[in-house]
Amino acid sequence: MEQRKRIGFNTLISLLLVITCAFMITGVAFSMGGAEEIIPNEPDEPEIAEMQETDDGEDVDSDDTAEAGDADTTANDPGEDDEDIVQSFIQIQAAFEPFAPFAAGLTSLTNITVRAGSGSRDPVAGDSIAGLLDPDTGYEFELNFGADGADNAMVFASHLDKIVIQEKDTDTDIKRTPTQAGSSPYAVRIPVSGLKPETEYKLIIDKSIADADGLIDRVITFTTDVSTAPPVNTDFAAVFCYPAAGTRTMAIERSIVIEFNQEVKRNTVEGTTNVVLETGSISGGGTDVPIDFSLDNARKVLTVKPKGNLSAGTDYVLTLTTGIQNNAGTEYLKQSTLTFRTKSFDVLSADSAADSVTVTIKNNAADEQKNTRVRVEIRRDIGARLESGGTVVYIGEQSQNISGGATGIYVFSGIDYTTDLYNNEARGDTYIDVYVSDNQGRPLSDPLHIQI
């Protein structure tokens, strides 16, 4: 029985080897020109083994004097067979190399948009981005390409290296990770962070990303503003802060967190005026805010907790003075400030009906009246997820004056949810995004993302 099992197993292995060899031979033939005749290599002349005479007069191969165990090992050595198989696979790979996928069906670069943080997308006009970008803020560029309608039209991952961001003066690449998870198969998103202040950059799109004459090389330039982040001290520095400098939607109940690169001497923070939180601006004239402190994570993380909620829609300044020291007594050498603003509004709801969306917001800043702009975007289908992706099928904006403490209701009607996209595929998931800002486009609340 055991012998029959072994014979059956060996037969199966032999059959699999025959099938594998058939595929390899087909691949090699394909790589050498398809229908052309395959001419095998001439075999090498056999090597004539050195002969020697035994005592009984018979001629034997000198290798026959090897021990039986060594002979068995040599007979079972698969090294040469493995090399042949590897070479065959290399030939097969080379045969298919000319058919590597390109960005099929793309015809043009239709538009470029840029988003700061989690805000709304702004279109880029011409070959430069207007204004100065905040180097302390993360950005995301989205490139949208036109397509010829082919079912397989898309940007392939292997071609994302055709999109580069560099410092303009030095041609130094900056770290970026393009993704295909844009608003369509023809879109590419590029998150960017860690930009240098007061530096000019260029976004380079190589036309070879697509197989089309309509796409040309594009270079988009942009420049960063001065940094408002706490200055870096290589000896004793603050390396992280929450909220980020310039934030305008800080939650009123949140604490402020400063992380240092070295341990902080406790008695240079607690019970001192070396860390001060005030209302107002850097120019002064504000009111001190009572705060508590805590140090954790090996005394490198300082948490500043207001004794009560902050006021909505209010500017604040946190000041770190040179009196702060590390464990070795080294002072924080340069006084620094962190400015931020608490959010004014909350998005209470976004209710959808058959052809409309109703958004309700509340102005939490009791003494402030705001001309408030509400923007609604509806996304769905391929790639759609809660905070991004998919295709924008509707955009609407409305403005109202809302008094402090009051509620505003915005009704967006005439919305068509039924538009079929991408060759009449199923509509998929649908999401509503709500953005609240002032008339200058500055955010007044965190965006709301809901699925309907």
Image: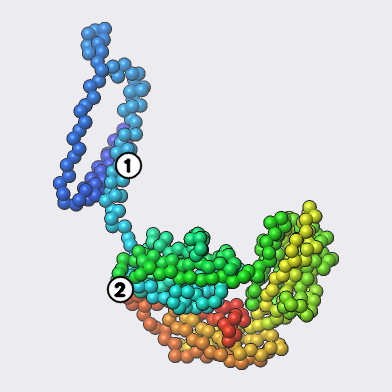
Horizontal arrangement in the rendering, residue 56 relative to residue 412 (left or right): left
**SS category of the residue bearing label 1:** helix
Q: Taking the image as drawn, is residue 337 in sight?
A: yes
- Relative to 279, say whether 181 is above or below: above
Query: What residue type is disc 2 on?
Result: Asp
Residue that mark 2 sits on? 148
Q: Where does label 1 land, which residue?
A: 86
| Amino acid under disc 1 | Val
Q: Earlier in the sequence, mark 1 or mark 2?
A: 1
> How far apart are labels 1 and 2 at the CA level?
40 Å
Which residue sits at x=80%, y=74%? 290
Marks 1 and 2 close (CB-CB < 8 Å): no
Return the residue nearer the eye: 313 or 77: 313
Write the residue at 69% across / 85% down: 365
In the rendered image of this protein, does residue 3 appear above or below residue 322?
Answer: above
Residue at image point 62% right, 81% down: 444
Question: How is the rendered protein coloured?
Answer: rainbow
Q: Is residue 190 visible?
A: no
Which image quarter: residue 254? Answer: bottom right
Q: Which residue of the protein is positioned furthest toward the front in this rendering?
A: 169
- Looking at the rendered structure, the secondary structure element under dot 2 is loop
Q: State the quadrant of the N terminus.
A: top left
User: Left or right: where does residue 282 sit relative to residue 395?
Assistant: right
Q: Which label lies toward us, 1 or 2?
A: 2
Percent position of residue 118, x then y: 55, 74
Q: Is residue 291 above or below residue 39?
A: below
